[in-house]
């Protein structure tokens, strides 16, 4: 089965907001991504609205033809917005205003009450709920206990090792992802992966049996600056397909 590619279009909005214009339009970018082969669109509505804004989420929901995955913190405000917009998927992520980007996975046990409210709302409205977690067995087991349908494994440490670490560290981080995927699948959870993935390092991740989806944004928009958005998505889709060839055959 092919691995689903969800493209995060946050940084199209970052460029737009830098000048206070209406362009580039993240909704148009999302439609270009779909035409180039994306299976879904991801957008992170942050508390400080540093890139995606509320209007973007509503427009994306009505304009795209695939799946809208809304990344958000487990706050009352965001749960209310998700209940009103009704995206196909909600991914709960940790959020700190001072961070550049999402750092680390959710503290699922520590935020169990807030996550539980999001789970209840999503189940009531038939919205799929995913939790962004470290590739850690305890976090995965806690995700199952709280009622998530999917976990998205944080691939940041693996990606950092690909850029700067020795092969042994890269292998260690990839092994963590393999083990976390196996535990999640044993618990009946779907498995996605994301954070820092590029067309250069995504292959070994999608080669992991049980990984069904990747969420990739920054590297797509970075490639789009140089090569165009259509080509950036197509090149990434091709890299994913090559990675799938590395999966062991039954």
Image (cartoon, rainbow, N blue to C red):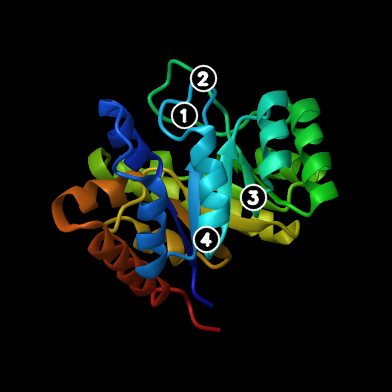
**Which sits earlier in the primary sequence, circle 1 or circle 2?**
2
How far apart are the two marked residues, 4 and 1, measured between alpha carbons?
A: 20 Å
Left or right of 226 in this view: 173? right
Q: Which quarter of the image is occupied by the C terminus? A: bottom right
How far apart are the two marked residues, 3 and 1, measured between alpha carbons?
A: 24 Å
**Which sits earlier in the primary sequence, circle 3 or circle 1?**
3
Res 134 label: none
Residue to which mark 3 is pinned: 87
Q: Indicate the secondary structure of the residue bearing disc 4.
A: strand
**Badges 1 and 2: C-beta atoms under 8 Å apart?**
yes
| In this rendering, the label closer to the viewer, 3 or 1 | 3
Residue 176 location (% of width, % of height): 51, 48
How far apart are the two marked residues, 1 and 2, measured between alpha carbons?
A: 9 Å
| Residue extending furthest toward the left | 226
Q: Indicate the secondary structure of the residue bearing disc 3.
A: loop
**Badges 3 and 4: C-beta atoms under 8 Å apart?**
no
Residue 137 location (% of width, % of height): 65, 43
Res 103 label: 1
């Amino acid at each position: 089965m092919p691995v689903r590619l969800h493209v995060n279009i946050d940084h199209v909005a970052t460029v737009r907001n830098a000048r206070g214009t209406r362009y580039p339009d993240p909704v148009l970018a999302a439609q270009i991504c779909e035409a180039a082969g994306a299976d879904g669109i991801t957008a992170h509505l942050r508390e400080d609205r540093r890139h995606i804004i509320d209007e973007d989420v509503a427009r994306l929901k009505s304009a795209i033809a695939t799946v809208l995955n809304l990344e958000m913190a487990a706050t009352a405000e965001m749960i209310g917005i998700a209940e009103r917009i009704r995206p196909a998927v909600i991914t709960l992520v940790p959020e700190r205003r001072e961070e550049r980007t999402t750092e680390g996975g959710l503290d699922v046990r520590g935020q169990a009450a807030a996550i539980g409210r999001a789970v209840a709302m999503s189940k009531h409205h038939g919205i799929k709920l995913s939790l962004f977690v470290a590739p850690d067995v305890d976090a995965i087991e806690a995700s199952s206990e709280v009622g998530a349908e999917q976990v998205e494994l944080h691939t940041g440490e693996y990606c950092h090792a690909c850029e700067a670490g020795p092969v042994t560290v890269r292998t260690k981080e990839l092994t963590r992802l393999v083990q976390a995927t196996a535990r999640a699948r044993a618990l009946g959870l779907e498995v996605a992966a994301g954070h820092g993935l590029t067309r250069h390092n995504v292959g070994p991740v999608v080669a992991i049996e049980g990984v069904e989806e990747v969420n990739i944004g920054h590297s797509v928009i970075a490639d789009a600056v140089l090569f165009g958005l259509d080509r950036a998505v197509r090149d990434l889709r091709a890299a994913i397909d090559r990675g799938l060839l590395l999966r062991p055959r039954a």
